[in-house]
Amino acid sequence: MNLVEAANTVIETIAQMAQEQRPLMLRVVPEDEVHFWKHYPEKDARDAKCKSRWYYHVHAPGKRDADEHGHFHLFLHRTQLPEGLEPKVWPPQREDARAHVTHLIGLSIDTVGIPRAWFTVNRFVTNEFLYPAEVMIEHLPDFNVDRTKEDDLVNRFVTAMVALYRDEIAELLRERDARHAELVAQYGDEGYEKASGVEVLSQIPIDLDAKLSSLDLG
């Protein structure tokens, strides 16, 4: 998916959600009761073909920015990377990491359903198999969640957002690795883990109007 296709898909999906008066978060979490920290959907949204996946969750008040409703965690499956490629860091307990995923990026959503920020997280947050930034960047085009069993507009929106912001995500992943290096210098291998006390490693705000205006959409 090229930039123009991605931009048009983002516009289309957001417009359709607005027309149906069902914002993004109501397509992912129940209207009546949201359980903080829970994965929505419970076993993640998994693409039927390529195994990319996402889940959405909501942090408790005081543990999130005031204008954030919740955020997506987006993943590549290890089978989407070259066979035999060793991760930079393995989960400490490999049997507890059966999902075999590597975290690509986080996507924060505001209280009306509009994307507000991209961010990367430390390895322990999602118990991922951690690969170097340049590996993840090379495989950014492989991320696709159009064929999960969840809401089609949400799936297409998420896939298109990653395609639209590949350059920015690449830079965030490089910043993630640089921050990891600082933490490892301070804590050793615990720099990747909860003992470091650091969850978010890099972050940028999203100005979707400005991004779309910068493109020639014909």
Image (cartoon, rainbow, N blue to C red):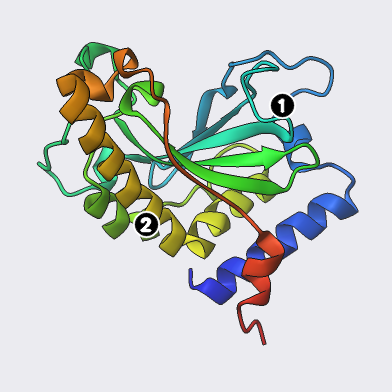
Residue in the foreground of this view, choosing between 175 and 118: 175
Q: Secondary structure at mark 1?
A: loop
Q: Is residue 35 above or below residue 84?
A: above
CA gap between label 1 and label 2 equals: 29 Å
Q: Residue at x 82, y 24 (%)?
A: 31
Q: Which of the image's four quarters has the C terminus?
A: bottom right
- Residue 109 in which image quadrant: top right
Residue holding disc 1: 29
Q: Position of residue 97 (x, y in %)?
A: 29, 19
Please tell me how crowded label 2 is: few (under 14), some (14-19), or many (20+) other residues with Cα within 10 Å: some
Please tell me how crowded label 1 is: few (under 14), some (14-19), or many (20+) other residues with Cα within 10 Å: some
Q: Which mark is residue 170?
A: 2
- Residue 65 in which image quadrant: top right
Q: Position of residue 185 (x, y in %)?
A: 16, 29
Q: Residue most toward the bottom?
A: 218
Residue 123 in view in this figure = yes
Q: Residue most toward the front?
A: 186
Q: Is residue 19 above or below residue 90?
A: below
Q: Is residue 202 above or below residue 18?
A: above
In the figure, is residue 21 to the left or right of 171? Answer: right
Mark 1 vs mark 2, foreground winner is 2
In the figure, is residue 120 to the left or right of 100? Answer: right
Q: Amino acid at mark 2?
A: Ala
Q: Secondary structure at mark 2?
A: helix
Residue 90 in view in this figure = no
Q: Residue at x 73, y 30 (%)?
A: 66
